Image: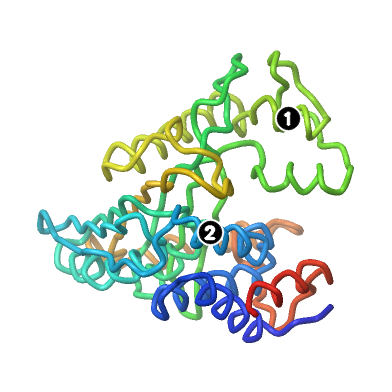
Amino acid sequence: MRVSVPEIKAKAHAALVAHGAGEMQAEAVANAVARAEALGNVICGLYYLESYCTQLRSGRVDGTVLPVVSRPRSSAVLADARFGFAQPAFAAGLPEAVTAALENGVAALAVAHAHTCTSLGYFTEQIAAAGLIGIGFTNASPVVAPPGGNKAVIGTNPIAMTVPGEDGPALHFDFSTSAVALGKITMAKAAGEPIPLGWAVDVDGRPTTDPEAALKGALVSAGGYKGWGFGLMAELLAAGITGSVNSLDVAGLKVAEGRPHDLGQFYILMDPGTYHDGFADRFARVAEAVAAQEGARIPGSGRQELAEVDVPDALWALVEKLAS
């Protein structure tokens, strides 16, 4: 069925409040859910709402805690989520981080001890909206094995980057460092469909097209050892720098009971005019060369924000049930 994005936000907000979130916290998370749906990122939208609600009830995420923001150094901002949602913690720390970046040219925002942030690009977009280049990293529960291995060590560990432009992002990408997001495998299992070779290995480390075998085994990194290196970089920044936990120490993100996620996100904010005033020209030079090739595009240039989206009937029925 077709559902408007404002209605998605309203239902998500109602569901979160009904399960124990505060108004401010529910607003921040519902905004992220609606934004994901508007951009077609269904894995990070309503698909996650039931998990949010279940974990609010179980106490795995604190829906009413207020984040604490500090500035340990002139260009370093820390937003402690205190085992609450990542979205309100980021919202609390962003203004101070923007100020620090404008003062110093470059700044970092660490979000610590947070629930999964779901769509990392949702946050780097907000950094770009302030006129700054935003790069983000986060980790997740362990589902990715090292090249040649068969046991998961790190999460899908996404990296996102957004570059500001005159009328919105000039460049935007947000992708996991694994070959695929875990949600695509769980969705394939639910649909009874095989997965492509190159996404995962089974418990013996053999490539598999069976989503159930993949879920019992591990995902692999995008691009082999190259993606593995980026995944480790995200791990060390998200866990090591912020003081949050390693992927190894996080139970499945959708598991109802258990310890809080305690994950970290690490963002770098850069003023593109710090060293010279020709950044836009340099970017345009690249963008024009890409546009001159038929079928090629700069990442994020083809995105369209929808006012209404298709939502499966069963999912919308669940959303309405959660909201009531």
Q: Is residue 300 above or below residue 153?
A: below
Residue 54 is drawn in which quadrant? Answer: bottom right
Q: Quadrant of the N terminus?
A: bottom right
Classify 10 Å Cα crowding around label 2: few (below 14), some (14-19), many (20 and above). many
Q: Quadrant of residue 99?
A: bottom left
Q: Residue 65 appears at what percent x and percent y? A: 32, 66
Tag 1: amino acid: Ala
Residue 115 location (% of width, % of height): 43, 54
Residue 128 position within the rendered picture, expressed as x and y whole percent measured from the top left: 40, 69
Q: Is residue 282 above or below residue 188?
A: below
Q: Are marks 1 and 2 in contact (CB under 8 Å)?
A: no
Relative side of 177 to 64, left or right: right
In the picture, measured across the screen, residue 289 lies left or right of residue 210, that is left
Q: Residues within 10 Å of mark 1 (few under 14, many from 20)?
A: many
- Number of marks in the rendered image: 2
Which residue type does callout 2 highlight?
Ser
Residue at label 2? 119
Q: Nearer the viewer, residue 312 or 41?
A: 312
Q: In this orientation, which residue lies closer to the viewer: 233 or 4?
A: 4
* Residue most extreme to the right: 192
Q: Identify the residue shown where x is 35% and y is 38%.
A: 245
The residue at which mark 1 appears reads as: 214
Name above or below for residue 125 compared with residue 324: above
* Quadrant of the rendering where the C terminus is positioned: bottom right
